[in-house]
Amino acid sequence: MELGRGLVTARHTPGHTEGSVTLVAPGVDGETGGVAFSGDFIFIDSVGRPDLAGKTQQWCGDLWRSLQWAKTSWPDDLVVCPGHYASEGERNSDRSVARAFGSIMQKNGSLLIDDEVTFREWVESSVSIPPPAYRRIKAVNAGLLSASPSEADVLEAGRNECAVG
C-alpha cells in the first residue's frame, strides 16, 4: 500500500492474536533503516503473549514462526515501534517507544531463544494471569460493547499486559 511517497507492507504476524499484523515501511533508499509498527507482536523487552484466547499451544507456534521471520528478515537499523511499553526503561528520553531492531535483539531475552521447545517452555513459565479487563477489551474491539472515550483511553493505554513476562 502506498502512503505518501512511500510503500508500507502489511505482514501477517500471528501469535499474540490470529489476525496480528505488522506494518513495515522501508528506509528512504529502500535498503537501510525503515520502521516497523509491531503493535503487540514485538515489544522493546518482550513479545506478545499467545495465551489470552485459550489457544496457547497453537498460537505459541504461530508466534515462534512470526518471530523467526522478523529475526531473519529485519535489518538491525529498522526502527521498531510497539503498541505498548511495560516500564519506563522501554521509553526513550523524549518518552517515545521505539528502538532499532539490532538493539532490541541484544536485550530482549525472548528473541535470544534459539529453539522452539525452549521458547514454548519460556512462554509457559512466564505468562501471568490474564488482565481483569481482557474480556471487556475484546468485546469492545469486536463491537459487542461500547466504551466512552475516557474508558477507551484507559483500556488501550493502560499497563502493558499483552507481553509475556
Image: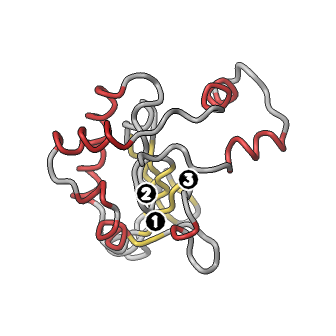
Distance from Cα at disc 2 to Cα at disc 3: 14 Å
Q: List the single residue furthest toward the bottom.
A: 93
Q: Residue at x 42, y 22 (%)?
A: 54
The residue to which callout 2 is attached is 24
Cβ–Cβ under 8 Å for marks 2 and 3: no
Q: Residue at x 55, y 62 (%)?
A: 87
Report helix, strand or loop for mark 1: strand
Percent of width and height locating residue 20: 45, 38
The residue to which callout 3 is attached is 83
Front residue (pair 135, 3) = 135
Mark 3 or mark 1, which has the lower sequence index? 1
Q: Residues within 10 Å of mark 3 (few under 14, many from 20)?
A: some
Labelled disc at residue 35: 1
Report helix, strand or loop for mark 3: loop
Q: Residue at x 46, y 24 (%)?
A: 53
Q: Is residue 106 above or below residue 158?
A: below
Cβ–Cβ under 8 Å for marks 1 and 2: yes
Percent of width and height locating residue 51: 41, 31
Q: Is residue 26 above or below residue 65?
A: below
Front residue (pair 119, 82) = 119
Amino acid type, callout 1: Val
Comparing labels 3 and 1, the label whose residue is closer to the camera: 3
Mark 2 or mark 3, which has the lower sequence index? 2
Q: Residue at x 42, y 61 (%)?
A: 45
